[in-house]
Image: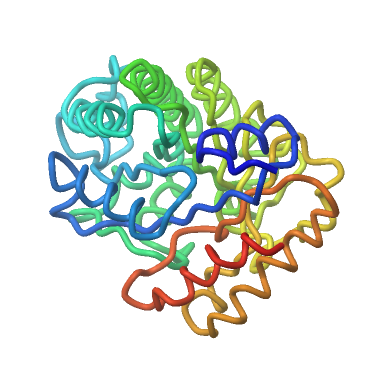
Amino acid sequence: MQPMSKTERVNAVIRGETPDRPPISFWHHFDAGKHAGRPAVDAHLKHLQTDDLDFLKVFFDLGYPVDRPIESLADLRTLSVLDGDEGVFGLHLDTIRALATELSGRVLITTTIFNAWATLRRVLRKGPYVAKAGPSTPDAPATVRMTEWVAQDRRAMADAINVIGQSLANFARRCIETGADGIFLSVRDDWVDTPEIGPGSYDALVRPTDARILNAASGGRLNVLHVCGRAVNFNAFAEYPVHVFNWADRSSGPAIADVAATLKPAPCGGINQVTTLPASSAPACADEVRDAVAQAAGRPIIIAPGCTYDPDRVPHANLAAIRRAVETV
């Protein structure tokens, strides 16, 4: 088979066709000084070039535009639907525009959007947001406060999530209009469908806003769903209208072999970002590539970790081993 371009390779997998080799990508948060402007552009381009990625996930760690701190349930009523280009949204659009200009379609760009629940959780954090890889704790103060507020006034929380969801939908639309090829929507239901909040709460409070965001991004050609944590309802997420589905198949499940035949979007995973990537050898990383392809059983797959990795802990040799391994599977 003739060598494909990076864009051709990813598009082939999305169409369910066998590429010249499995595409790869992986991603990590950047330091605070590289979240916007030229530093953000340069950091993403360096990451893309150094690791020879087949598509670029652009991070959005700038937060959410609010006029005043949200300290109480009453403060939730101050939230209003945004056009999607205000404040930090606009800064991120500038980053996308610059990346799209420099890459000129040679590499597909998908940009991170945390769903409405996760975004509200970040709004409620005390102090500046510090991006990091690894699991977050379900008993973090912002999560505890959200749980309490749902119990106190479920309608107020539902309204706030709807407002944020519509704002994120507007932002998603502008991201694609500005030059992104799609969005990388991060979702998580295991901190919503809890005994304290109640089963089915994700369906009632959050899932409609996920749909609204994805509908706004429907013009994209690389919309990725990232399921964070251990999904309570994996099958519901598997029905989302996206091109690519990324999840922590090794650390959270289900295994690729269990869903490869039925998952509608292209599967994206295979590398354990919790143990193998930071703590094992380059041969072990290559073994996971081969095993992931074998589990897919002929289904085209994108090789990636199940979530972000910590660049201070992961040896570059392990990343390079993943890139080499896809040449021989």
Instruction: Please give left or right for residue 40 compared with residue 124 in the image.
Output: left
Residue 203 locus on image (x, y percent):
65, 33
Instruction: Please give left or right for residue 26 compared with residue 242 in the image.
Output: left
Which residue does the image show at 14% across and 48% down from the upper left? 39
Q: Nearer the viewer, residue 227 or 70?
A: 227
Residue 253 makes an appearance in the image: yes
Residue 172 locus on image (x, y percent):
40, 24
Instruction: Please give left or right for residue 263 compared with residue 127 in the image.
Output: right
Q: Nearer the viewer, residue 162 or 72?
A: 162
Q: Nearer the viewer, residue 190 or 6?
A: 6
Which residue does the image show at 76% across and 57% down from the upper left? 256
Which residue does the image show at 76% across and 34% down from the upper left? 264
Q: How many marks?
A: 0
Which quarter of the picture shows residue 141? bottom left
Q: How is the image coloured?
A: rainbow
On the rendered image, what quadrant is the C terminus found in? bottom right
On the rendered image, what quadrant is the N terminus found in? top right
Residue 175 locus on image (x, y percent):
35, 24
Residue 65 makes an appearance in the image: no
